[in-house]
């Protein structure tokens, strides 16, 4: 049978989900630059530049700042596998899907898992972490900064200080927060931190930035080889660091894309970028509020890069999402696990966090809901425009 597989033509979606976010044309262009050998001096130079830009974004002086080949989960797995040995006690703050994933990996590493739990949509109280630190004396603690499943930004400064006081290693997931909200790696006493490329950094999916300080490195470098060859940070650093020993062939085109995305961040400046994410989230929430929707996250702790919205029972949230995609080309997502069918998750990450996108999704929602005989209480677009007008004054 004859078949024809045509040239790839993907739609230009308005990506307002939990990532990937929109790629700037500069990032797309950078990915079309030539692939060279993995020991080519020009590529080694690109690696060094990428590391330097990542130190700026992570707000760290950590020498060991590198890019793993793999998505955010590779960053998570590498951080945990390289630190945890069989029988090690690990304290994890659990209040959502991704902290559950961390817990699962701790168990797979043979670690003794201790959790401090909070209901999904709430932060983990520092006081509860303190109690657990004193009671269980774990050598390692892990927390998620931006919990994408619930739209919560977990405060970390106070917990980081408590963890450091006790000489414990502090690991943080910044997959949904880095590049969109302040992440103070050194100031918050974070010893190992990983992220993903495809969210607020505005790079293609598939690489995971990681930064490790000397306290964590001492633990990582003094242990027996881990079962994973691919995610062995000791071996990976021999390539990313000055030794330049081959470990595996890196995804150069993705690293080119990440480097350009980081250059864009540096040009915008972190403070301006955080402000942009904050204002667009405020406008979105004001618009949705006027339409009769409430945020799901605990008040004062909403993650501006991923806005979780409660969906009233009389609205079929799946139909609305499908219509947004089919009729308006807009991607948003529903809830994970226990929140399936109950919330929408609207991402405003990196290049996707724009005034235009906020007004477009509000207008689309207004039209769809009116068409479904659920007209909004008031105009979301007008309420959002009012936020922008006030900010401009
Ligand atoms: N951690 C958080 C907070 C995330 O939001 C995600 C992805 O959504 C991950 C980890 C896993 O990242 P990835 O899907 O890139 O493997």
Image: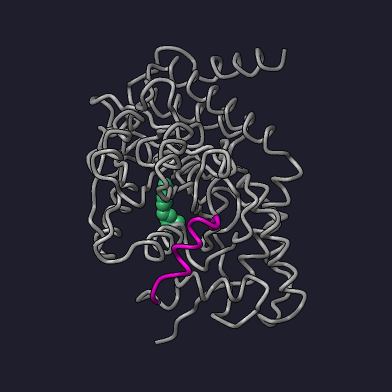
Residue 279 seen: yes
- Name the spot of residue 232 as percent of width and height, x first: 45, 72
Residue 33 vertical position relative to residue 249 in the rendered view, above or below: above
- Name the spot of residue 319 as percent of width and height, x first: 32, 38
Residue 235 vertical position relative to residue 318 in the rendered view, above or below: below
Describe residue 386's horizontal placement relative to residue 44 as left or right.
left
Q: Quadrant of residue 368?
A: top left
Residue 81 vertical position relative to residue 384 in the rendered view, above or below: below
Describe residue 134's horizontal placement relative to residue 223 as left or right.
left
- Name the spot of residue 294 as percent of width and height, x first: 37, 20
Residue 392 vertical position relative to residue 309 in the rendered view, above or below: above
Look at the image and give the residue range highlighted in magenta: 210-224
Figure colour scheme: one colour
Residue 341 seen: no
Quadrant, the N terminus: bottom left
Residue most toward the bottom? 1
**Magenta stretch holds residue 24:** no
- Name the spot of residue 254 as percent of width and height, x first: 61, 65
Q: Quadrant of residue 47?
A: bottom right
Name the residue located 42 percent from the left edge and 78 percent from the top edge.
229
Q: Closest to the observer: 5 or 361?
A: 361
Quadrant, the C terminus: top right
Name the residue located 57 percent from the left edge and 71 percent from the top edge.
237
């Amino acid at each position: 049978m004859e078949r024809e597989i045509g040239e790839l033509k993907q739609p230009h979606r308005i990506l307002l989900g939990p990532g990937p976010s929109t790629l700037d044309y500069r990032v797309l262009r950078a990915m079309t630059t030539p692939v060279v050998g993995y020991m080519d001096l020009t590529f080694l130079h690109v690696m060094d530049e990428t590391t330097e830009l990542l130190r700026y974004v992570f707000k760290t002086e950590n020498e060991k700042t590198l890019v793993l080949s793999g998505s955010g989960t590779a960053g998570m797995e590498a951080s945990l596998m390289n630190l945890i040995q069989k029988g090690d006690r690990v304290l994890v703050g659990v209040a959502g899907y991704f902290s559950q994933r961390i817990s699962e990996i701790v168990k797979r590493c043979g670690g003794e898992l201790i959790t401090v739990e909070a209901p999904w949509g709430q932060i983990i109280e520092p006081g509860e972490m303190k109690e657990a630190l004193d009671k269980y004396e774990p050598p390692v603690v892990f927390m998620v900064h931006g919990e994408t499943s619930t739209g919560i930004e977990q405060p970390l400064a106070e917990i980081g200080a408590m963890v450091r006081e006790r000489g414990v290693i502090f690991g943080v997931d910044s997959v949904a927060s880095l590049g969109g909200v302040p992440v103070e790696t050194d100031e918050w006493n974070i010893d190992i931190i990983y992220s993903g490329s495809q969210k607020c950094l505005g790079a293609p999916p598939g690489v995971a930035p990681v930064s490790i300080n000397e306290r964590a490195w001492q633990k990582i470098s003094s242990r027996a080889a881990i079962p994973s060859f691919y995610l062995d940070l000791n071996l990976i650093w021999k390539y990313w660091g000055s030794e330049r020993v081959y470990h595996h062939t890196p995804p150069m085109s993705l690293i080119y894309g990440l480097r350009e995305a980081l250059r864009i961040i540096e040009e915008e400046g972190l403070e301006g970028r955080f402000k942009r994410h904050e204002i667009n989230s405020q406008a979105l929430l004001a618009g949705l509020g006027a339409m009769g929707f409430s945020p799901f996250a605990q008040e004062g702790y909403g993650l501006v890069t991923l806005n979780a919205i409660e969906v009233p029972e009389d609205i079929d949230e799946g139909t609305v999402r499908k219509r947004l995609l089919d009729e308006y080309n807009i991607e948003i997502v529903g809830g994970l696990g226990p929140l399936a069918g109950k919330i929408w998750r609207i991402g405003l990450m990196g290049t996707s966090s724009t005034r235009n996108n906020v007004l477009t999704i509000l207008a689309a929602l207004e039209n769809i809901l009116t068409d479904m005989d659920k007209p909004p209480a008031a105009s979301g677009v007008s309420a959002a425009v009012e936020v922008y007008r006030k900010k401009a004054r």
